[in-house]
Amino acid sequence: MNVPKEKRSNPRTALHQLVQFERTAAELCTADTELTQGVGRDISPAGASFLTSCPLQQGEILRVRIPAELEHHDAPVISEVKWTQPTRHGFRVGLQFLA
């Protein structure tokens, strides 16, 4: 059996908390809210992944609010969508932190 080679350079930590994000483009997932939500799956110093019902595209830039108890601040983190994967109830999204 072929096991895909791990591409991550940083180990990830489980993240089972609400994650809020804002798309930087004019088109939002839902017209009536600015922040969209997802459920975190894992996080590292370089990126994170989460589950969401909002269809995101590879290359989109997001402002993501990481739970304060993990990052010790409440400022949004600018991130790029590196991959998306359909799931039974929406999408799993992989992010790379940019700033």
Image (tube, rainbow, N blue to C red):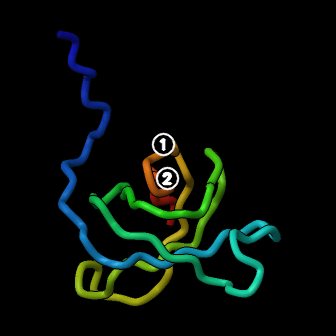
- 85 or 58, nearer to the observer: 85
Considering every residue shown, the one lying at the far front of the view is 88
58, above or below 50, in the image: above
Residue neighbourhood size for the residue with mark 2, other residues' Cα within 10 Å, grouped as few (<14), some (14–19), many (≥20): some
Going from N to C along the chain, the mark reached first, 2 or 1, is 1
Mark 2: secondary structure: strand
x%, y% of residue 71? Answer: 29, 79
- 32 or 57, nearer to the observer: 32
Q: CA distance from mark 2 to mark 1?
A: 5 Å
Which residue is under mark 2? 91
48, above or below 31, in the image: above
- Picture residue at 66% right of the left edge, 69% below the top: 23
Q: Which quadrant is the N terminus positioned in? A: top left
Q: Quadrant of residue 38?
A: bottom left
- Determine whether, in the image, residue 36 is placed left or right of residue 74: right
Mark 1: secondary structure: strand
- Determine whether, in the image, residue 55 is placed left or right of residue 15: right
- Picture residue at 71% right of the left edge, 75% below the top: 30
Which residue is under mark 1? 85
- Picture residue at 44% right of the left edge, 47% below the top: 87
Whether the residues at callouts 2 and 1 have beta carbons within 8 Å, the answer is yes
Considering every residue shown, the one lying at the far top of the view is 1
Residue neighbourhood size for the residue with mark 1, other residues' Cα within 10 Å, grouped as few (<14), some (14–19), many (≥20): few
58, above or below 89, in the image: above
Considering every residue shown, the one lying at the far right of the view is 26
How many marks do you count on the picture? Answer: 2
87, above or below 76, in the image: above
Query: Given the image, on which type of amino acid does mark 2 rest?
Result: Phe
- Picture residue at 29% right of the left edge, 76% below the top: 17
Disc marking residue 36:
none
Q: Quadrant of residue 66?
A: bottom left
